Image: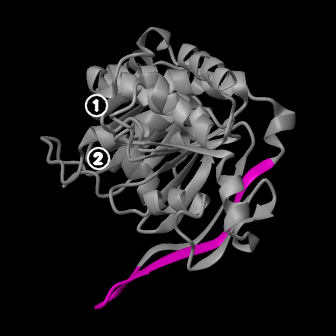
């Protein structure tokens, strides 16, 4: 994805030392622990983690729907903690939000749903209707203005929710599991729409998700939350190529379903190879096997489109003979491939 370097220099959201503790009658739960994160203007930023990791709590702290127990959140350089309720309401108008289950007003038409925030903002009737119709055109639903949400598909309802979120001209759009209730084809179309909104309107987008495929499809940068802690951050393509933490490795290899994998080969020496558009799977692996004279077991192989560029990965189980295994690693490194040693990948 192409981005404007000047726009990217501005920090749109800064999170400093953020912690959030929920207190019940019997216990305290520390949902977030000392989160520090910068999100720049113009980015599509993915925040990813497994269920219960704390990512949804984090996104609610970004607009102070949840007040942090400790730490600060700055939006466009202003500390939300210093704002009174009136100032917070004004700031939230610049932060749109869409949800997993759409949250549409079922008794209102599609047009009525998009008009709702304009009515609250006291935008004059004809002006509001014109703007609402323009937004419905942007999301591809001009012909559905008069129908009701119950008559729409899940993808169409999410498009209405996106149009409604854009009605207040936000600078930031928070998407909390916005594609989790959708099928893969519809998810792809919604992500394409968000990418287009980002490019055409310059809106900074934060996507909260448990799916690495969503991050790979559309995000420029990613933060990985694990057990309430910020495990890893960076550009998506760099984190994919060189994941540093166990949390990142689990997420990028989630399609492998490798936990406790038992294979016919005796060797437990496994490696992960990362391929880019300048390398390909078959010749490299085939030539390596021919060169060393020993077969390998391919435990995982897939390709991903990250920022419009094909990236791939393979996990290989190497032979038990350590000399031959090391010869294979050296062969791959001479081909300028990224090779990562894996532990406990197979039993």
Answer with left or right where residue 321 lies relative to residue 287: left
Answer with left or right where residue 192 lies relative to residue 42: left
Figure quadrant of residue 125: top right
Figure quadrant of residue 84: bottom right
Q: Which residues are magenta?
A: 11-29
Within 10 angstroms of label 2, few (less than 14), some, or many (20 or more) residues?
A: few
Answer with left or right where residue 77 lies relative to residue 318: right
Q: Is residue 59 magenta?
A: no
3D distance between C-alphas at marks 2 and 1? 10 Å
Q: Taking 36 as reference, is 283 above or below it?
A: above
- Residue 177 % position (x, y): 41, 44
Question: Could you tell me what secondary structure mostly forms the magenta stretch?
Answer: strand
Residue pointed to by mark 2: 321
- Residue 112 % position (x, y): 47, 28
Foreground residue among 131 and 258: 131
Residue pointed to by mark 1: 294
- Name, please, the residue furthest toward the front: 125
Q: How many marks?
A: 2
- Are dots 2 and 1 in contact, CB under 8 Å? yes
Q: Quadrant of the C terminus?
A: bottom left
**Mark sitting earlier along the chain (2/1):** 1
The secondary structure type at the circle numbered 2 is loop
- Residue 323 appearing in the image: no
Q: Quadrant of the N terminus?
A: top right
The secondary structure type at the circle numbered 1 is loop
- Residue 320 % position (x, y): 25, 47
- Residue 320 appearing in the image: yes
- Residue 285 % position (x, y): 39, 24
* Residue at 41% in and 68% down: 227
Q: Taking 308 as reference, is 58 above or below it?
A: below
Q: Is residue 13 magenta?
A: yes
Q: Taking 237 as reference, is 52 above or below it?
A: below
């Amino acid at each position: 994805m192409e981005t404007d370097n000047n726009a990217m220099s501005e920090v749109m959201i800064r999170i400093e030392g953020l912690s959030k503790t929920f207190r019940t009658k019997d216990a305290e739960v520390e949902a977030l622990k000392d989160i520090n994160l910068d999100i720049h203007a113009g980015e599509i930023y993915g925040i990813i983690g497994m269920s219960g990791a704390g990512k949804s709590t984090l996104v609610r702290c970004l607009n102070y729907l949840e007040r942090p127990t400790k730490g600060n959140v700055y939006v466009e350089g202003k500390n939300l903690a210093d704002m009174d309720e009136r100032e917070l309401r004004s700031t939230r108008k610049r932060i749109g939000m869409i949800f997993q289950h759409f949250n549409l007003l079922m008794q209102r038409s599609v047009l009525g749903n998009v008009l709702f925030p304009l009515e609250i903002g006291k935008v004059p009737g004809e002006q509001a209707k014109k703007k609402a119709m323009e937004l419905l055109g942007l999301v591809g639903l001009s012909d559905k203005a008069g129908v009701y949400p119950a008559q729409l598909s899940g993808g169409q309802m999410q498009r209405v929710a996106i149009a409604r979120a854009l009605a207040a001209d936000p600078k930031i759009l928070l998407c909390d599991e916005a594609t989790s209730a959708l099928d893969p084809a519809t998810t792809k179309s919604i992500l394409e729409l968000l990418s287009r909104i980002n490019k055409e309107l310059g809106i900074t987008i934060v996507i909260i998700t448990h799916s690495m495929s969503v991050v790979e499809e559309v995000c420029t940068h990613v933060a990985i939350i694990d057990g309430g802690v910020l495990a890893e951050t960076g550009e998506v393509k760099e984190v994919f190529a060189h994941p540093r933490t166990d949390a990142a490795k689990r997420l990028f290899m989630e399609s492998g379903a490798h936990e406790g994998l038992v294979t016919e080969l005796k060797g437990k020496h496994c490696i992960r190879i990362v391929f880019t558009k300048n390398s390909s799977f078959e010749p490299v692996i085939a030539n390596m096997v021919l060169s060393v004279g020993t077969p390998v077991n391919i435990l995982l192989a897939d390709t991903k489109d990250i920022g419009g560029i094909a990236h791939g990965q393979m996990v290989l189980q190497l032979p038990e003979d350590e000399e031959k295994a090391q010869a294979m690693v050296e062969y791959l490194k001479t081909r300028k491939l990224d090779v990562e040693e894996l532990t406990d990948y197979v039993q």
